[in-house]
Amino acid sequence: MATAAFEDLAETFEFLDDWEDRYRHVIELGKAFPALDDSFKVPALKVQGCASQVWLRPQIDAGRFDFQGDSDAMIVRGLIAVLHALYAGVPVAEVAAIDATAELGRLGLNEHLSGQRSNGLRAMVQRIREEAARAA
């Protein structure tokens, strides 16, 4: 049920043999991901449960979910970009049906992130689901 953008990302990850290459790719995704304007880095958009500072700004257009996001850690910005590939453009009513753990597992992220990063990633997914449910 992944988006075409996420499928493209999964294909790229298949070609990257070791975790260090994948890690570097996630960082590159973070560098390329558009920064969130500082005016949106407010407590209401901050994701709790992340070791780094993380902000997610949901955007709903014609019933489809999208978001902007940012972090003070480049690897986390990359994880935000990965989540964007997974969720952007999905109808809000279908966001909850996406098994983020399984999809991210396809990239090999689950077993290679620290406990704190994994918790933060779960917190971001939870926030995305909550925002989509609120909009549905």
Image (cartoon, grey):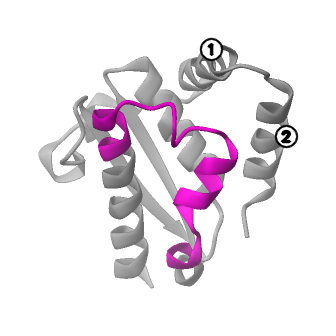
Q: Amino acid at mark 1?
A: Glu
Looking at this view, is 115 or 93 the one in front? 115
Which residue is labeled 1 in the image? 20
Residue at x 36%, y 53% (from the top left corner):
122
Q: Is disc 2 placed on a helix, strand or loop?
A: helix
Res. 35 visible in picture: no
Q: Amino acid at mark 2?
A: Glu
Image quarter of residue 82: top right
Badge 2 local density, few (<14 within 10 Å), some, or many (20+)?
few
- Magenta stretch, main secondary structure class: helix
Q: Please state the horizontal and vertical placement of residue 9, each as a whole percent of the image.
A: 76, 40
Please identify the quadrant where the C terminus is shown: bottom left
Q: Please state the horizontal and vertical placement of residue 129, each as a whole percent of the image.
A: 41, 69
Residue mark closest to the camera, 2 vs 1: 1
Q: Which residues are magenta?
A: 95-120
94 over 64 or under it: above or below: below
Residue at x 24%, y 48% (from the top left corner):
47
Badge 1 local density, few (<14 within 10 Å), some, or many (20+)?
few
Q: Is residue 117 magenta?
A: yes
Q: Is residue 40 left or right of residue 5?
A: left
Please identify the quadrant where the N terminus is shown: bottom right
Q: CA distance from mark 2 to mark 1?
A: 17 Å
Image quarter of residue 43: top left
Which residue is labeled 2 in the image? 11
Q: Earlier in the sequence, mark 2 or mark 1?
A: 2
